[in-house]
Amino acid sequence: MPRKPSQDPEQVGANFSRVFLVGAGPGDPDLITVKGLDLLERCDVLVYDSLVPPELIERSPAAEKHYVGKTLGGHAMPQDEITSLLVRLAKAPGPPRTIVRLKGGDPYVFGRGGEEAITCARAGIPVEVVPGVTAGIAALAYAGVPVTHRGLSKGVVLLTGHKARGGLPDLPWRGLVDSGLSLVFYMGVTTLSSIARKLILHGMDPDTPAITVQEGTLPGQRQVTGPLHAIARLVTEHGIRPPAITAVGSVAGLSPLLSRQLPRPLAGRIIVFLRAEERHYSEISQLRSAGARVLDIPGIRFLPLTDTPRITDMMRSLEASHVVLLTSSIAAEFFSSLLHRQLAGKQATNSSVAGWQPVMVPTSPSVSSVLVKHGWEVTIQAGTPGWAASLESMISSGLRKGTPVWMPRSTVADDQLPEAVRKAGFLPLPVPIYSSHPVPLSMDVRSMLVHGRVDALVFLAPSCVESVTSSMPEILKGLDTGRTIVAALGPKTRAAITRNGLSCHLVPSEYTVPALVKAILRYFEPGSS
């Protein structure tokens, strides 16, 4: 349970809230400091950047979350508005609050944290800095480069690779070359050829080792090493994209010896999984192990309906000879809760309920596993997923014509299944037991989708498709770039994708998350796409 922040005026300031500038680290969410994580898990307000791992955002219980990310091709908020926002939040009426300004890397290393701290201090707002691990050290360490090493480099210089408005910054190039120190360039992918030319022009050996590391410390980390004169060409040939760090100096030559990376065929790929908020799938860890950056995001929230006349009638009328046809794991979860509650009530009145249950018919392995988890016997199980196969199994099992078939389901489910049940000779009894509600995507994820920086957009339910396309119709613009493939868990989700104007590129032959993960791995295998 997250701890409530202290409201001691001496700790948070007598008049205003306190602002904490917290470094999130270089990318891997596990590399945030203990103090930074503690503040994140008990803050009242969170203001965060585009390079902050989504996993950290989800760990914060803050009632207010403000995305202010700045990425290539899209700024959520200019810098002066960010500093104004911090002041406005800190001066808001009410009791003092803990405000965390979460920034990638370290707030004071090319994070403009100094500007934000000065603005807060001048406004009389208490501000504290919680340092973070900067990518200029950590990304290179993960790539096998110690930025200092006795005999090779007695120091390191951290440099920006471009001006605020673009182009190469004015740097003391001769002094940098003569220093013999390790040179680490942030934000220098687009100007890398110019940087190399400047260094060589001012006397650096063209064969000096260099390395560029993309998405350092993340599962999708990629790196390219080579001589200074060729590093820009190699970066282009290998498709290295920002965010990336470049190091120039003898220490870069240690990377082949010290870097022990496992093969990662999906390195550099970004995959967005949109699922129900209530569902979590451990299988997607296989994609992370293969090198992909996986954003596992809730796109829809399901809420159970309680004590509606139709639910009450179903629970009162349900008999052991009746069939319960369940087409989703969410329906299985909510129906199991209803049935357990009813059986508990019968036990309280000394009714005999031992071993009692209706005929349970799941339409997929995932639904079946939910039923088994709740202690129910799966009575009829088709050999293949899908309600059509389940209906065939019901017919072949010898169920008598006219058997009531209860269908606990979503409030937005269509009439296709009830009509098929009726044509099969059974009595269809659809009952809505839960409703679906969109979960807005964070601004950083929206920016990535709109600007075509995602390799795969994966929908696990039709309602997730409806939620995303209705809340952000501009998603079509990002998908038109041709980089992003759209994947669906099954036919219903694929139909929702096409119905909303998107193209569906991938559906697994078996409609399960493990099968979908395997299909994505196969799709992105080198030479497959």
Image (spheres, rainbow, N blue to C red):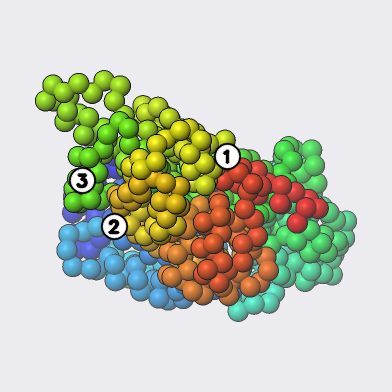
Dot 1 and dot 3 residues touching (CB under 8 Å): no
Question: Is residue 16 shown left or right of residue 168?
Answer: left
Of badges 2 and 3, nearer the viewer stands 3
Residue 190 is at least partly visible in this image: yes
Question: Is residue 365 shown left or right of residue 429?
Answer: right
Question: Is residue 205 shown left or right of residue 191?
Answer: right
Q: Residue at x 42, y 46 (%)?
A: 425
- In the picture, the disc for residue 205 is none
* Residue of label 3: 313
Residue sitting nearer the eye, 78 or 247: 78
Crowding around mark 2 (Cα neighbors within 10 Å: few <14, some 14 to 19, many 20+) is few
- In the picture, the disc for residue 63 is 2
Mark 2: which amino acid?
Ala
Q: Residue at x 88, y 56 (%)?
A: 207
Q: Residue at x 34, y 67 (%)?
A: 86
Q: Secondary structure at mark 2?
A: loop
Query: Residue 402, image x and y in percent?
Result: 36, 43
Mark 3: which amino acid?
Asp
